Amino acid sequence: MSNLRLAFSAWAMRELPVEQQIAIVQRAGYVGICLVSDDRFAALDAMRISSAERRALRSRLHEAGLSLTAIAGHANLLEPDAEQLRRNMDRIRAGLDLAADLAGAAGPPPLVSMGQGKPETYATDRTRLAERFGELAHHAALRGGVLALEPHVGQAMDQPEKVAWLMQTVDSPCFRLNLDNSHFEVMGRDMDEYLPQLLPYAVHTDLKDQRGRSPDHEFLVPGEGDFAYARYLQALRDGGYAGYLTVEISVMVQRRPDYDPSEVAARSFRTLVAAAREAGVPLEHRGAGIGAV
């Protein structure tokens, strides 16, 4: 069985130049990075980046020894304005094209996107989401890639049963799951409930810490809460997941006046490496200790 591999998401530092994002992740000892494509941040935008810039980015990742684990490229698929919805769909297609252009030896990294909507409108939202994700999965297939849903507390796709329904309804190997378990945890779901339902669809995972129950919850830096990381790593391994475990830092943390992405990346790294050691689960990284490469 392949090892889990430790990565860090540039969501923690979206405003910084990509070169600086890569340097922070490399320095902390991770083996992978999830980049963010978003028109709100100048660092990387799939709709604007040129062919030459794509080649240069691929070279920078290679030189840094980092794998591109995924690209986060969110756009609202339930946008009521028809013209804006068309642009949102085009944005996700552009993200899938960017992933194909940045593909490594294992193929294009998944493009991660949320569905939006609200829990109270799930009954009507789900059919439209299935249709639109299905259309985008067809484009992913043409590019040899994968579109990965990110469920989110407070959105239509917020519970594991809903996610499983959507996966089965779209029924495409090019539509899969970015498993960010924190959203299920703050709704009081236990990993023994959601992992058996969702691991068969997971192609990427995000990980943070959390405290409280929705809507009175808080996302935290790994190690700041009481989440059982060792138990989670064991459950991932036992469930057959072998891929990237990507630390994601919430906007809630980024709003702190003393926030420093380099410090948070280093602290999260230590937390996960210690948890892997406790669990006896091999975890690939570039620091000293268990599973170092």
Image (tube, rainbow, N blue to C red):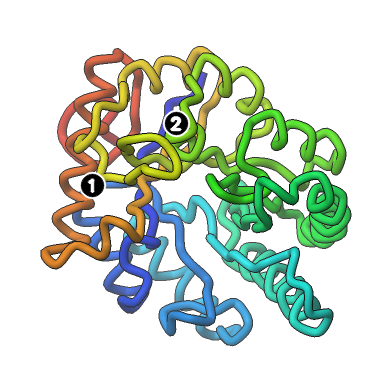
User: Residue 71, position in %: x, y?
Assistant: 54, 60
Q: Residue at x 59, y 77 (%)?
A: 46
Rendered image: mark on residue 29:
1
Horizontal relation, residue 36 to residue 263: left or right: right
Q: Nearer the viewer, residue 155 or 131?
A: 155
Q: Nearer the viewer, residue 152 or 260?
A: 152
Rendering quarter of residue 247: top left
Residue 70, compared with residue 197, is above or below; it is below
Instruction: Depth check: give the residue in front, 251 or 69.
Output: 251
Query: Is 52 situated above or below 8?
Result: below
Tell me the number on the disc at residue 185.
2
Which of marks 1 and 2 precedes in the sequence?
1
In the drawing, does residue 50 fall left or right of residue 76? Answer: left
Q: Secondary structure at mark 2?
A: helix
Query: x, y percentage for residue 39?
Result: 53, 81
- How many numbered marks have been drawn onto this rendered protein structure? 2
Work out which residue is located at the far left of the displayed protein and give it: 258
Q: Amino acid at mark 1?
A: Gly
In the rendered image, residue 79, in percent from the top left (x then y), is placed at 74, 71
- Distance CA(mark 2)–CA(mark 1): 27 Å
Quadrant housing the C terminus = top left
Question: Which class describes the residues within 10 Å of circle 1: few (<14), some (14-19), or many (20+)?
Answer: many
Q: Position of residue 265 (x, y in %)?
A: 23, 51
Which residue appears at 75% of the width and 46% of the height? 122
